[in-house]
Image: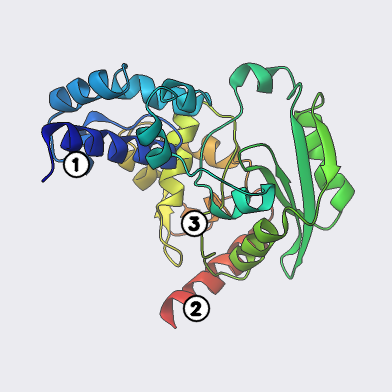
């Protein structure tokens, strides 16, 4: 029979997992809906189990420090974060999405960050994928591998880059599936840097089902910032991981395509393929 402590721990695990999946804090209303308790009760649960408020845990997720908060709570940690990976490849194929690189490290050009990369041939063009310790840091689409990689190097000039097709093979397969309009068997893990607002936008984009679209206004309303339509558009434009964070699913309110960093032809093909898959 479940005890009060068991119920408290389960609510905390549910909330923590949701924030890890979203890449940062969730609103009190969102957490209430997920845990079926009041924000006040959940705050008490977090104080007992984690030692900080839910929002503080969400910020720790965004800065890559969430695991440190849970290090004294072994069972909870294991329930929130997948553990026991036997290899880098196993981690990439199994781990959930996070927002991982600490802002200070990003601001220093990725100093000390060892990045791996691979190139994937698709009929959308070449997809270059760069991965950090927790997952994808960048996904670029184009025709020139070196030019695409140079973009990422320019953003993270102090990081080291090494091609590693083998350990990123599962990740590459997932990107190939996304480029064809399909859905990978598992969520591809993310290791991104962004503001809290950008993280909310990117998380909202990942909730748009394949084959569907949303307007910038609808995305702004969904994240609870209905007047921030321009900021939503900016966050979409700054999306560092094409395909995985599907900014191609956001269009203008009048139904027109709007912009797309990798070209409107690519955006149109992606949407057409996703609609075909969804209808089949």
Q: Using the image, determine if residue 77 lies above or below residue 179.
A: above
Q: Is residue 29 visible?
A: yes
Count all numbered tags in the image, as a single digit: 3
Instruction: Write down the residue under mark 3.
Output: 249
Residue 94 spot, x, y in % from top left: 54, 53
Q: Position of residue 255 (x, y in %)?
A: 44, 59
| Left or right of residue 208, residue 165 in this image | right
> Is residue 52 or residue 232 the one in the foreground?
52
Res. 54 image quadrant: top left
Look at mark 2 in the image and give the residue it sits on: 276
Sequence order check, earlier mark of 3 and 1 = 1
Q: In the shown orientation, is residue 47 left or right of residue 272?
A: left
State the residue at coordinates (52%, 23%): 63
Q: Residue at x 25, y 18 (%)?
A: 47
Q: How is the image coloured?
A: rainbow
Dot 1: element:
helix
Q: Nearer the viewer, mark 3 or mark 1?
A: 1
**Label 2–label 3 contact, CB within 8 A:** no
Residue 244 at x, y percent in the picture: 57, 52
Q: Residue furthest front?
A: 1
If you read the primary sequence from the N terminus, does the residue marked by circle 1 or circle 2 appear first?
A: 1
| Badge 1: residue crowd in 10 Å (few <14, some 14–19, many ≥20) | few
C-alpha span from label 3 to label 1: 26 Å
Instruction: Give the Cα separation between the discs numbered 1 and 2.
Output: 33 Å
Eye-nearest disc, 1 or 2: 1
Dot 2 alpha-carbon crowd within 10 angstroms: few under 14, some 14 to 19, many 20 or more: some
Q: Which residue is mark 1?
A: 33
User: Residue 175 is drawn in which quadrant?
Assistant: bottom right
Q: Residue at x 38, y 24 (%)?
A: 57
Q: Is residue 130 left or right of residue 249?
A: right
Q: In terms of depth relative to the viewer, which is nearer, 251 or 32?
A: 32
Q: Secondary structure at mark 3?
A: helix
């Amino acid at each position: 029979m479940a005890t009060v402590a068991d119920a408290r721990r389960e609510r905390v695990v549910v909330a923590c997992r949701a924030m890890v999946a979203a890449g940062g804090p969730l609103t009190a209303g969102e957490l209430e809906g997920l845990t079926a308790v009041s924000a006040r009760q959940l705050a008490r649960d977090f104080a007992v189990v984690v030692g900080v408020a839910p929002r503080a845990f969400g910020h720790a997720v965004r800065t890559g420090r969430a695991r440190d908060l849970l290090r004294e709570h072994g069972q909870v940690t294991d329930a929130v974060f997948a553990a026991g990976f036997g290899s880098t490849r196993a981690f990439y194929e199994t781990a959930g999405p996070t927002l991982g690189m600490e802002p200070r490290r990003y601001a220093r050009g990725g100093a000390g960050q060892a990045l791996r990369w691979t190139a994937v041939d698709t009929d959308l063009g070449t997809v270059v994928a760069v991965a950090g310790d927790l997952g994808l840091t960048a996904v670029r689409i184009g025709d020139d591998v070196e030019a695409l990689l140079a973009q990422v190097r320019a953003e993270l000039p102090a990081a080291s880059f090494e091609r590693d097709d083998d350990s990123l093979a599962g990740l590459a397969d997932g990107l190939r599936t996304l480029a064809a309009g399909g859905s990978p068997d598992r969520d591809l893990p993310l290791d991104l840097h962004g503001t809290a607002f950008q993280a909310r936008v990117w998380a909202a984009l990942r909730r748009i089902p394949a084959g569907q679209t949303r307007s910038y206004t609808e995305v702004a309303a969904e994240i609870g910032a209905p007047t921030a339509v321009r900021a939503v558009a900016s966050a979409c434009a700054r999306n560092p991981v094409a395909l995985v964070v599907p900014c191609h699913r956001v269009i203008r309110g009048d139904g027109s395509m709007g912009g797309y960093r990798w070209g409107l032809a690519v955006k149109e093909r992606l949407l057409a393929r996703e609609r075909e898959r969804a209808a089949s």
